[in-house]
Image: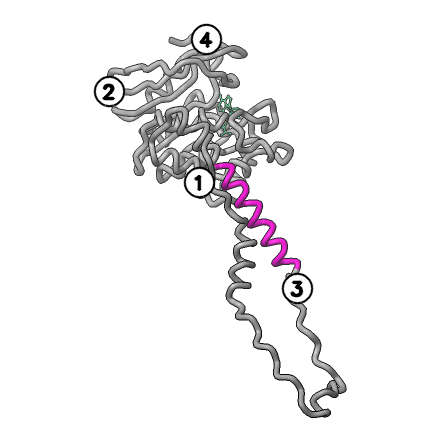
């Protein structure tokens, strides 16, 4: 258990600072003549310090964001760093991307729990630890070109966009692709390019990619994706039958050779389309 410093919401601090800045008023001199005891005919209205509705809404919104931020930092500490993800850039990206913006309203309270959540159409936003682990396995450098297969909510794409200049992502369900694209734009992730299609075949017009991440499970390794890697590119992909456990693979291309590293069991929704034919090498 990691002890956390209790912090006051930002708006409380602002009020405290504002109050601290007000010097205590000097008591007025006691009136000495009758004229000073007579109130003026029209007394000036007492200024009542009242927050405008806009200021109140802004203070509430700031307090809410602060609470989400604290939950996010706690999540990274207790479920991601504690389980072995150590790349500081990946940890910083996980601390930055507001996962609560990517989950449906009814799951807001669970946004920073370490499990997948439904996003509609039978699909899920992945578990934060798995997002961090797969991102670390991509071994990204700032100038890298990255392709994601399975945009879903757009959350993984946003994490990638914190680490590289441009991200390409493909989603097979048009409604998810459209909402993810709008959400990413609204949050300022302008350098994420979203396309609707079967990601099994990659994005040949933009290839080669330094790294490719597949966030749904094919039952075999997609050869088109391997072919769209640079000479030293990395492919991170869960492979296995739909409905059960799959194996997470990191494939590292070294020229014409490919080295495969088994990262253990995971559970993903199936990569539909070309990913489920089962008749490919
Ligand atoms: C586990 S979700 C991905 C979560 C997503 N990365 C996120 O951060 O929210 C898997 C996604 O892959 C999509 N998908 C499945 N098969 C696909 C295919 N052949 N091409 C592209 N996307 C596919 C699903 O529709 C689903 O949105």
How far apart, in angstroms, are the residues tagged by discs 3 and 1? Answer: 34 Å
Q: Of the residues under marks 3 and 1, which one precedes in the sequence?
A: 3
Query: Which residue position holds label 2?
Result: 254
Q: Of the residues under marks 3 and 4, which one precedes in the sequence?
A: 3
How far apart, in angstroms, are the residues tagged by discs 1 and 4? Answer: 38 Å
Residue closer to the observer: 30 or 130: 30
* Residue 167 visible in the current orientation: no
Part of the protein shown in magenta:
53-72
Picture residue at 48% right of the left edge, 26% below the top: 150
Overall secondary structure of the magenta stretch?
A: helix
Picture residue at 57% right of the left edge, 45% below the top: 64
Q: In this rendering, which labeled residue sits more in front, label 2 or label 4?
A: 2
Contact between marks 1 and 4 (CB within 8 A): the answer is no
* Residue 218 visible in the current orientation: yes
SS category of the residue bearing label 4 = loop
Q: What percent of the width, then of the height, locates residue 116? A: 54, 25
SS category of the residue bearing label 1 = helix
Contact between marks 1 and 2 (CB within 8 A): the answer is no
Q: In this rendering, which labeled residue sits more in front, label 3 or label 4?
A: 3
Q: Callout 1 environment at 10 Å: few (<14), some (14 to 19), or many (20+)?
A: some
Query: Which residue position holds label 4?
Result: 278
Q: Callout 2 environment at 10 Å: few (<14), some (14 to 19), or many (20+)?
A: few
How far apart, in angstroms, are the residues tagged by discs 3 and 2? Answer: 66 Å
How far apart, in angstroms, are the residues tagged by discs 3 and 4? Answer: 67 Å
194 with respect to 179 (left or right): left
Is 246 covered by the magenta stretch? no
Q: In this rendering, which labeled residue sits more in front, label 1 or label 2?
A: 1
Query: Which residue position holds label 1?
Result: 96
């Amino acid at each position: 258990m990691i002890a956390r410093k209790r912090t006051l919401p930002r708006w409380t601090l602002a009020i405290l600072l504002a109050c601290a800045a007000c010097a205590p008023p000097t008591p007025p001199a006691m009136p000495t003549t009758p004229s000073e005891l007579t109130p003026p005919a029209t007394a000036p209205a007492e200024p009542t310090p009242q927050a405008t509705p806009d200021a109140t809404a802004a203070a509430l919104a700031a307090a809410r964001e602060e609470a989400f931020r604290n939950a996010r930092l706690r999540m990274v500490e207790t479920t991601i760093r504690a389980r072995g993800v150590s790349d500081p850039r990946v940890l910083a990206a996980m601390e930055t991307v507001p996962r609560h913006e990517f989950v449906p309203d009814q799951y807001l309270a669970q946004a920073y729990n370490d499990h997948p959540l439904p996003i509609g159409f039978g699909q899920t936003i992945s578990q934060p630890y798995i997002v961090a682990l797969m991102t670390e396995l991509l071994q990204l450098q700032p100038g890298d070109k990255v392709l994601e297969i399975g945009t879903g909510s757009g959350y993984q794409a946003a994490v990638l966009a914190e680490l590289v200049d441009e991200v390409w992502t493909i989603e097979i369900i048009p409604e998810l692709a459209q909402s993810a694209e709008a959400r990413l734009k609204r949050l300022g992730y302008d350098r994420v390019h979203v396309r609707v299609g079967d990601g099994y075949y990659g994005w040949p017009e933009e290839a080669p990619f330094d790294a490719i991440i597949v966030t749904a499970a094919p039952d075999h390794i997609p050869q088109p994706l391997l072919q769209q890697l640079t000479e030293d590119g990395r492919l991170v992909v869960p492979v296995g039958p739909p409905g059960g456990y799959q194996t997470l693979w990191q494939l590292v291309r070294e020229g014409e050779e490919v080295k495969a590293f088994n990262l253990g069991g995971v559970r993903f929704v199936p990569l539909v389309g070309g990913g489920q034919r089962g008749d490919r090498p």
